[in-house]
């Protein structure tokens, strides 16, 4: 019985996809604005992540070198 319903579903899906009727509608720039906003946010988040991956380890190394220099200067 399941095979029968699968065939009916596939035939109706093929029928629905094969019919091309024009919609005569103008979508406009409405969908473009959220897409551009998302794109800008992804670029911004990627940039911030890249800076975080590069600058944070450098900041930690800088602190370690400063602490080492302070200890070295105190010994003199």
Image: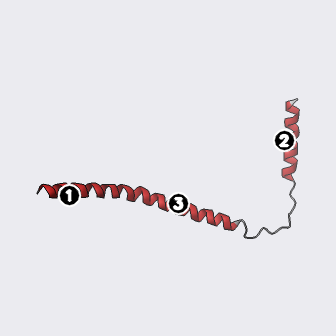
Camera-side mark, 1 or 2: 1
Q: How crowded is mark 2: few (under 14 residues within 10 Å), some or many (20 or more)?
A: few
Do the residues bearing badges 2 and 3 touch, measured as CB atoms within 8 Å? no
Residue 43 left/right relative to 16: left
Position of the N terminus, as image quadrant, is top right
SS for tag 2? Answer: helix
Q: Where is residue 76 shown, x and y percent of the image?
A: 11, 57
- Residue that lies at the very extreme toward the front in this rendered image: 74
Q: Residue at x 86, y 37 (%)?
A: 7
Residue 39 located left or right of residue 32: left
Query: Where does the image place residue 40, in percent across and percent down from the top left?
Result: 58, 65
Q: Nearer the viewer, residue 49 or 19?
A: 49
Circle number at residue 70: 1
Q: Residue furthest left?
A: 76
Circle 2 residue? 10
Report the Cα–Cα distance between label 1 and label 3.
36 Å
Residue 51 versus residue 2: which sits nearer the camera? Answer: 51
Label of residue 45 in the image: 3
């Amino acid at each position: 019985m399941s095979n029968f319903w699968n065939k009916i579903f596939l035939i109706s899906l093929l029928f629905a996809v094969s019919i091309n009727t024009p919609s005569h509608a103008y979508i406009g720039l409405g969908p473009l604005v959220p897409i551009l906003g998302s794109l800008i946010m992804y670029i911004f988040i990627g940039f911030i992540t890249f800076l975080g991956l590069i600058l944070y380890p450098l900041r930690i190394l800088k602190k370690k070198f400063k602490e080492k220099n302070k200890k070295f200067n105190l010994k003199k």
